[in-house]
Amino acid sequence: MFLSNLLLVTVFSFLTSVIPCTIFSGVNASSTEELVRRFVETSMLCNKHKYNPAVSISVVKNGSLLFADGFGHVDGTNSSSARPTSDTLFGIASLTKAFTATLLATLMEEKGIPLYTYLKSSSLFNNNHMFDKYEHRTYATVKDTLSHRMGFANHNFLRFGKYRSTDIFDICKNLKKKAAIRTSFYYNNIMYGLMASLIEKLGNDTYESLMTSHLLRPLGMTSTTFSGNANIEQLDLARHCIDTEGSLYNVPYSFTRKWAEMAGSGNILSSASDMGKWMNFFLSGGKNSSGHTVVQESVIDDIFHGENPIPQSAVDYMKYFTQPEAPVTLSQDVYLLGWRKGYYRGLPIYSHTGSTWGSSTMIIIIPSKHLGVYVGMTGRDKDYLFRTKVVTYIADLYLGVTPWIQPNQSCDFPEPFFSDWSSNKLYIDRDENATRPLNEYEGIFMNALYGQVTVARNQSDDLLYLQYGWAHFKLYPRTKDSQPDEFYMEGQGELHNIINFAECVFSHNGTHIDKVLMTKWEPSDVPEFARVA
């Protein structure tokens, strides 16, 4: 197998050293499609991408779907499983946000409610006590929530304990601000859960039904569905999968459903064909493939209206695609409503990425060239390297310029431009000893926002176990770094081989353990759970 893979890479390297300089005047469709296939297939053979077993690609230009296909195999742990097609579903993760923002803006336009309306108003939530601080209760608008300028840390792991849409109002009351409203960029999935609840209130139906009737059905997106309520075991779905400690594991369907239960931020499953229709919808100003208006162009304009500057620290991974170190610049400068505005090769673009447990995506549309590219893949994609180089390579082909990267360079990237990249994968040391008797860590701990965490010792293996909602973890002491009360967190049950954390930290007040800190759950606002029993 190694020799055959090596031979294939060598053949591709030879072909791409000859072909790229000759194809960009009068490109024909078949040669361009072949170059797309070569690049994707060559990249999938790379060692750093061997844990991305399935890929989905679609390209639209001038209103037509020029390319839609799948690569690899749909079951990450079974290499003989079927190859994905243009209709195979992938979890699109945070690309869902553009769907949510568009649906909400459409409903509000139908009712004559401006997007800058206060959330507390009688036409929206009719609630003066939604948030802890006066400024949020009084001045927060729909645009503030959709553009991540509320000033709240993400707290995404609330989904373990408070994951239903009905929990969203309890969450909002206990969120503590990290910054004043409209003064910062704090990416926040929970706020999109709040907007999903607003959609249901305005539309008097479920989020899923309203999304289907207002957008998916009129656009002909017949394959697209929702991971929170679909019978996903029966779907033509590329199975979400994750590499953990050197092996690949399928994400349990039950985990995928629960994680997506709070709608709005990342619960849509879609295909290459359907995402082509989605890109053309925006490029046409709100029309479907038949030319019929689905959403008023004024709504599309509102979606693409600049709202919130994105600090460099929030998109640090973009350094791998920024000149002068990289050959080209792809930027994400302003967060709009479910989209990011930036530039690629000096051309204005709208883009977004999505990452969830076992699935990674990216979308880019270039309005001035009537071009859109979508990529979905199973597995992790650290620093967005795989999806971004694929999207930009394909964009270059259809822009008619020589791609900045070639197949024979794909495996080494980000070298030679950057030499300090590392996968930084977590490996748990299961042989360290705790520095205190384990019974000192046992107890019940509470946090106003999250609720209850329970820590108990298991008699059979003499290890600590931590439970929060439907999430269970086995705790292994982490003492080699002279941190006496730190523990690795190894997921159990539905989380086994899917989610591990490098640490949780117990606090000792001089007489006893009084707190447990989930330092990896939200580093910008670490949840502290105080002992109550």
Image: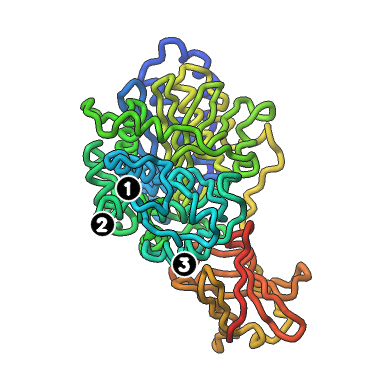
Which residue matches tag 2? 234
Which residue matches tag 3? 160
Which residue matches tag 1? 82
Q: Who is closer to the viewer here, 435 or 178?
A: 178
- Nearest to the eye among marks 1 and 2: give it: 2
Sequence-first disc among 1 and 2: 1
- In what quadrant of the picture does the C terminus appear? bottom right
Is disc 1 in contact with disc 3, using a CB cutoff of under 8 Å? Answer: no
Q: Quadrant of residue 165?
A: bottom left
Could you tell me how far apart the alpha carbons at marks 1 and 2 are, in whole angstroms?
14 Å
Q: Who is closer to the viewer here, 436 or 406?
A: 436
Q: Is residue 279 left or right of residue 313?
A: left
Picture coordinates of residue 105, whole percent (x, y):
35, 41
Could you tell me how far apart the alpha carbons at marks 1 and 3 are, in whole angstroms?
32 Å
SS at badge 1:
loop
At label 1, counting other C-alpha atoms closer than 10 Å, the crowd grade (few under 14, some 14-19, many 20 or more) is some
Q: Who is closer to the viewer here, 163 or 248?
A: 163
Sequence-first disc among 2 and 3: 3
Amino acid carrying label 2: it is Gln
Image point 30% across, 57% down: which residue? 232
Could you tell me how far apart the alpha carbons at marks 2 and 3 are, in whole angstroms?
25 Å
At label 3, counting other C-alpha atoms closer than 10 Å, the crowd grade (few under 14, some 14-19, many 20 or more) is some
Image point 49% across, 18% down: which residue? 19
- Nearest to the eye among marks 2 and 3: give it: 3
- Residue 214 against residue 349 in the figure, above or below: below
Picture coordinates of residue 466, whole percent (x, y):
55, 76
Amino acid carrying label 3: it is Phe
The answer to whether residue 17 of the structure is visible from this angle is yes
Picture coordinates of residue 472, whole percent (x, y):
50, 73
